Amino acid sequence: MKKRRYRIFIAAVAILTTAAFAQENQKYLSLDDCIVRALENNLNLAAEVLNPEIADLSVTRAGEKFLPLLSFGYSNRDTNTASYSFIDAADQVRSTYTDYMVSFNQLIPTGGQVNISLSSYKNDTNRSFQTINPRYGSTLTFDFVQPLLKNFGYKASRREIIIAKNTRDISENQFRQLLLETIYSVERAYWNLAYSIDNLKVRRQSLQLALDLLEENKRKIEVGTMPPIEIYTAEAEVANQKADILAAEALVRNNQDRLRRIINIPLDSEENAKEILPSDKPKFDKREITFEDALNTALEKRPDLEVIRIDLKTKKYNVRYANNQLLPELNLQASYWSPGISGDQILYLDDDPFTRVIVGTLPGPASDALKEAFRFKYQNWSVGLVLNVPLNTILSRAASAQAKLALEQAQWKLKDLEQEVILEIRTAMRNVETNYQRVQAYRAARELADKKLEAEQEKFRVGKSTNFFLLQYQRDAGDARSAELRSLVDYVLSLADLDRVLGTTFETKNITFSGISVKQDS
């Protein structure tokens, strides 16, 4: 008696140890957990999330054309030449010319540009008869150029920015579309894993029923109430059930690997060695939605439709721009400049330079030339129109025709996608309704199969049935349970597919966007 108790105690310890080890090697995850981990760790998303960032930088780069341009210039020229006349210089003519320049150039939204420049110079020479030497000069200039036909207007000047913004919006919507597909792939992998695990449980229950029947047949054969040949039917059923379990176990492992791949569990991590088990159960909640509401929702929220619409806006803009480029160039040009001059004034005997007798100098600093320029002492201006007529815009209109064809192509693509959306909505809604009815039908079939099995077991117990019929009802009951589980998972997946088709996955999963970052609200 003591020995038996000891064995029971050892068995209990072994069972508890096995259960604890199984818990350590299991990882329960909810559907939300898997979605969050896929959004954070999926390698495909990690690569694609860079596209909106790259497009956003393209917008910034395109906008840099309106940043002002500062230019600085400096040059120094020193020349020495032989004197061809003693009047010009005694031996050689020497001149030093130094030039300084700074300018500010700014594009304006109407397509024109404004330029403000300040140039100064110093000229020093040994030539005779100079009245100011060295001479300083400064000129403050304002230039304005405005296209009146070609390249005129706000949209023409911001062409690169407009296209870059549209490209960025397209990239963001393509990323949203990828998120929709990724979330749906997570749901599909998650619920298929849940089904395969529950299906494995059903197969094990069926195996247990077959084993129980086999044991009961052995007892009946031992007491002589059943012919020995009946044992083969039960043994064959046990073998079949074991084969079904092997296939079901392989399906579980395959689905676990698919889910690991989507949520990107590292291969070298401890978590990868754990068995993933879904903690959520599929819910059988009916959803009511009309086709008109579904279509309006899809047309408003589907990212792929928005991609085509944005591309269509770009194509329309390209047509207008191409037509604008056919116009001749007519530019309004206006300039205003204020010069200033200064230098050392040379005083000659009797105020006559031809005496070549210098009696003194009156210093004139370079700052005086700058002051005169900024005081607008000498005002000068000019206004003009310049017309350029490139022959290529008259003889060839290929660019305009190409833009129009591209626009027409985008319009057909939008219509085609809208027709595809209508088909997808009808199919998704039909699948939801069909799977809802399948769940009800398979649930009723499972309940009837269970009742038939109970009745057949009672008949078999009193000797009014055979192994063949009982095993048939056991298989029917097991198949009915599997069919009900499959239909329930198909219904949940059809709801997820409907969300994907309508573009409402983010709302149903409480996923919000901040820029291009994604988070799931609790």
Image (spheres, rainbow, N blue to C red):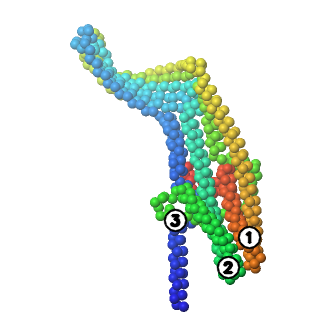
Camera-nearest residue between 198 and 51: 198
Which mark, by number, is residue 469? 1
Instruction: Tell me: residue 395, above or below residue 170.
Output: above
Secondary structure beneath label 3: loop
x%, y% of residue 502? Answer: 68, 50
Camera-nearest label, 3 or 2: 2
Which quadrant does the C terminus fall into? bottom right
Secondary structure beneath label 1: helix
User: Where is mark 2, residue-wise?
Assistant: 221
Q: Do the residues bearing badges 3 and 2 touch, measured as CB atoms within 8 Å?
A: no
Kind of residue sitting beneath label 3: Lys
Kind of residue sitting beneath label 1: Phe
Specify the quadrant of the image occupied by residue 464.
bottom right
Which quadrant does the N terminus fall into? bottom right
Kind of residue sitting beneath label 2: Ile
- Name the residue rendered at 25%, 11% in the picture: 83
- The CA distance from mark 3 to mark 2 is 45 Å
Instruction: Tell me: residue 82, above or below residue 237.
Output: above
User: Where is mark 3, residue-wise?
Assistant: 274
Specify the quadrant of the image occupied by residue 467.
bottom right
- Name the residue rendered at 69%, 39% in the picture: 415
**473 relative position to 327: left or right:** right
x%, y% of residue 383? Answer: 53, 20
| Pointer 2 or 1: first along the chain | 2
| Pointer 3 or 2: first along the chain | 2
